[in-house]
Image (cartoon, rainbow, N blue to C red):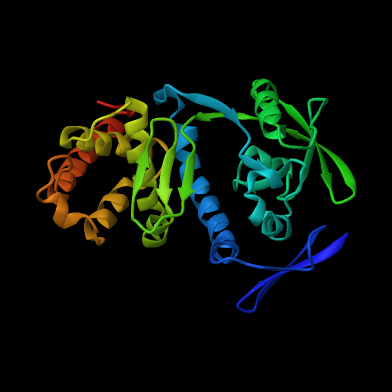
Amino acid sequence: MKRTLLCLAGLCVAGSSLAADYIPLTKNELAFAQILEEHQSYNARLQDVAAPLFKANTNLCPRTRRDIGMTVHTISDYQPSLQPFAEVLMDATDRLSVRTIRKGSPADSAGLKIGDKVIGINGAYMPGGFTVQRFFKVATQNAFKQDSTELKVMRGEKRIDIEVSPETICDYPANVFFNEKINGHTDGKQIIITSELMKTVPDDVNLALIIAHEMSHAIKGHQRKEKALELKADRMALVLMSNAGYDIDRAISYWKDTSHPHAESQKVSKTHPTIDERYENFRKEQARIETLKAAGKPVKFR
């Protein structure tokens, strides 16, 4: 098997292939190589910030799932022209391997590592190839219902048995979408946060507020864009954050003082409240939450 060198503008990445020894990269391929590490970093941060919201609010979420806090991939998850990068930079092969592990998750506590090749679940063999992702999803849906799940992994040349204890979380996966627009939205099944938004929100508590807002839309199945629903999602977001242990006073203060890219358009928007309207709405809901907590009552939606 030959070693392939992929190069453009001085950037070269060595990979293995049966193809030619030299492959010029397109601009899109170069961009993929350059943003890959950034994308991994954004996703890891998003998972860490979203996890407390998903774990603490299962009683408020109509959709839940069993989870161990890791994502997996194979090389076939990437476009053919980009697979050499995935192979070299992410150690992707035709076997199912661990792509990310959420900090503090059951997978993390059990000792799973990024790059581990998953070859078995509760005694069921995990094959390689194009259909393994589908097979893994079905296998984990059953395995994660149990209090304990045994994963068999390859770490280098060593086979390891790892016992992991799945947990129940809200089933609204949060994902990063690379886009130059500052935006967060939901389709009712997942939460999408753009890479540009991740760049512009360095504070994790404020990021949690954004995630919780979109999570609220998903929980209530909001389909239309209107002011009343936006304000309701803001109130619900504070409930979700409070239950997850986030400092909602800090979140509101940061939100008030930060720059809002859509502030001018919201002044005349028919679907979104103004910054001042949202701030007043936040403070009223904060007062309600503090009253409930002081009385020792559970914090729930209105």
- Residue at 63%, 41% (x, y): give it: 70
Res 297 visible: no
Q: Position of residue 133 (x, y in %)?
A: 67, 34
Residue 268 vs residue 120, the one in the foreground: 268
Left-right relation of 4 to 183: right
Q: Looking at the rendering, which quadrant does residue 162 occupy? A: top right
At a point 79% along the width and 25% down the height, the residue shown is 122
Which quadrant is the C terminus positioned in? top left
Q: Is residue 259 above or below residue 141?
A: below
Q: How many tags in the picture?
A: 0
* Image coords of residue 140 (percent x, y): 67, 27
In the rendered image, which quarter is residue 110 located in?
A: top right
| Relative vertical location of residue 267 with respect to residue 202 in this rendering, above or below | above
Residue at the outermost bottom position: 10
> Horizontally, is 76 left or right of 57 in the view?
right
Q: Position of residue 197 (x, y in %)?
A: 37, 56
Q: Residue at x 65, y 55 (%)?
A: 81
Figure check: 150 above or below 43 = above
Identify the residue shown where x is 15% and y is 43%.
Answer: 273
Q: Residue 111: percent from the left, percent from the top?
A: 74, 45
Query: In terms of image quadrants, where is residue 31?
Result: bottom right
Question: Quadrant location of the N terminus?
Answer: bottom right
Q: Is residue 283 left or right of residue 24?
A: left
Residue farthest toward the front in the current orientation of the protein: 20
Compare residues 287 and 72 and report the one nearer the observer. Answer: 72
Residue 194 visible in the current orientation: yes
